[in-house]
Image (cartoon, grey):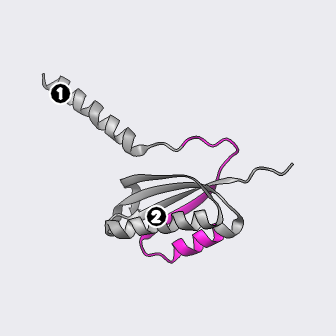
Amino acid sequence: MAAPAPSYDLVLLLHATADEQTRQKVGADVDKLIQDDGTLLEAREWGVRQLAYPINDEATAEYRVFRFQGPATLLNEIDRQLKINDTVMRHRIIKLERNPVDLPDLREIDEQAAAAGAAVAAAEAS
């Protein structure tokens, strides 16, 4: 019996200073690349977030994550296309273990944290 196809996570850091339309096009192009040659399992936009350290004097980037399955040729083509795209600050393709964890929804987590912070601030004010 053949082993199941491996799954991969592609993490993209896009220049936050690029216009929204350009960032959306990069996401759509990656989505199309994956669906043409592989299987897109999940895609998440994590929004503009603070970087752990500045990259080329930029402190923020828009994060996007794609979980997919596909052949090595797809990995090479994604890597090639992202290396020549000026909107992409960094990208990384990670091969996943057999039972990967679910991708978190960071925007939902941010909203919950903001609501909790507002509740604490309201309690302290009274």
Q: What residue is disc 1 on? A: 122
Q: Is residue 6 above or below residue 73?
A: above
**As rendered, which of 90 and 110 lies closer to the eye?**
110
Q: What residue is disc 2 on? A: 27
What's the magenta region?
75-102
Query: Separation of disc 2 and disc 1 at Cα?
Result: 39 Å
Q: Is residue 122 above or below residue 90?
A: above
What residue do we see at 63% from left, 55% from top?
Answer: 8
**As rendered, which of 45 and 79 lies closer to the eye?**
45
Residue found farthest to the front = 36
> Is residue 51 within the magenta segment?
no
Q: x, y percentage for residue 57?
A: 35, 67
What residue do we see at 17% from left, 27% from top?
Answer: 122
Along the horizontal axis of the image, is 33 left or right of 14?
Answer: right
Kind of residue sitting beneath label 1: Ala
Callout 2: SS: helix
